[in-house]
Amino acid sequence: QWTCYVWNLLLTAELHPQSGLVPQDLYRKVFVFRNDPNDAHVVVKPEPEQSLQNFTVCLRSFTDLTRPYGLFSYATKAQDNEILLFKPKPGEYKLYVGGEFVTFRVPEIRMDWEHVCASWESTTGIAEFWVNGKPLPRKGLRKDYSISAEAVIVLGQDQDSFGGGFDLYNSFTGEMADVYMWVYGLSPGKMRAAYQSLQLPPCLLGWRNLQYELKGDVVVKPRLRETLII
Ligand SMILES: *[C@@H]1O[C@H](CO)[C@@H](O)[C@H](O)[C@H]1NC(C)=O
Ligand SMILES: [Ca+2]
C-alpha cells in the first residue's frame, strides 16, 4: 500500500542515495524547543523538491506561549513568507501564501496538544484550515499563484530572509510532532486521518521518515503520552 511512510522510504533509497541528511523515523517522538526566546529551529528537507500549485501542511504543537510564534516557515529567495503557518495569539492562526495571508479564528481550548492542517489550491485560491480534525470556514488567497521549489523549510521560527532573519520573540517554545506536507489538498477523510495519526498517502515531508537538522537549543525526546489526540 502506498503510504506516506513507504513512499518516503522508496524515494530516499532510490532517488537520493547520497543525500546528506539521514531520514529518521520520529514515531512516538517530539521536538522540544526548550527556551523562550530562542533562535532554535529545525530545518527539514522535502523529497523531492518541486514547485507547487497545491499543498497541505499538518503538524501538532503543545505550548503555553501567548505571544506570537512561527510554526512552519517555507521561504524562497524572492519571498520569505512563501508558505508560513503563524500563530499571532491564542485563538488565531495566520496562513501565508506567496506573501499574503488569511486569518483563521480557532476555538479557545484548554492547554493541550493542538493539531492543525492548512491546505491551499492555486486554481481557486481556496485555503482550508482544520483544527483537531474539524474544518473552519474556508477562505481564499493568491489565486493562480505558483509556489517556488527552491526553498528552505524551517520549523519553530518565522524566516524573514532565506534560511534566517528570525525575530526571537516570534520563536516557538514547547513541543512539536507529526509534521507532514503533501503536494495536493488532502480529502476530508485524510485530514481526519492526519489528526488521528492513521495511515497517510504519499507525502513530501513525513514524520515517519523525516530528513531534518536540529539548529540550536532543540532536542528530540520520546512522547510523554501514547497518543497526542485531544
Ligand atoms: C491542484 O489541484 C487542483 C484542484 O484540485 C487540480 O485541478 C490540479 O490539477 C492540481 N494541480 C497539480 C499540479 O497537482
Ligand atoms: Ca517572514
Image (tube, helix red, strand yellow):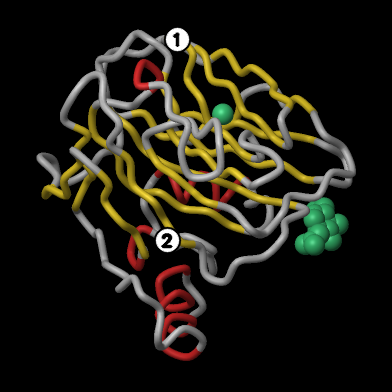
Which residue is the site of mark 1? 89
- Helix, strand or loop for disc 2: loop
Q: To which quarter of the image does residue 167 belong?
A: top left
Label 2 Cα crowd, 10 Å radius (few <14 / some 14-19 / many 20+): many
Disc 1, disc 2: CB below 8 Å? no
Quarter of the image where the C terminus is located: top left
- Type of amino acid under label 1: Lys
- Helix, strand or loop for disc 1: strand
The image position of residue 71, as x and y in percent, is 43, 33
Residue labelled 1 has its Cβ within 8 Å of some atom of ligand 2: no
Query: Looking at the rendered structure, which numbered label has been put on residue 206?
Result: 2
Q: Looking at the picture, tell me which residue is in the foreground, 108 or 10.
A: 10
The image position of residue 124, as x and y in percent, is 87, 40
Give the residue displayed 47% in from the left and 60% down from the top: 205
Query: Where on the image, by quarter, is ligand 1?
Result: bottom right
The image position of residue 32, as x and y in percent, is 19, 38
Q: Looking at the picture, tell me which residue is in the foreground, 228 or 89.
A: 89
The image position of residue 224, as x and y in percent, is 10, 40
Give the residue displayed 33% in from the left and 47% down from the top: 42
Give the residue displayed 18% in from the left and 38% down from the top: 217
Label 1 Cα crowd, 10 Å radius (few <14 / some 14-19 / many 20+): some
- Type of amino acid under label 2: Gly
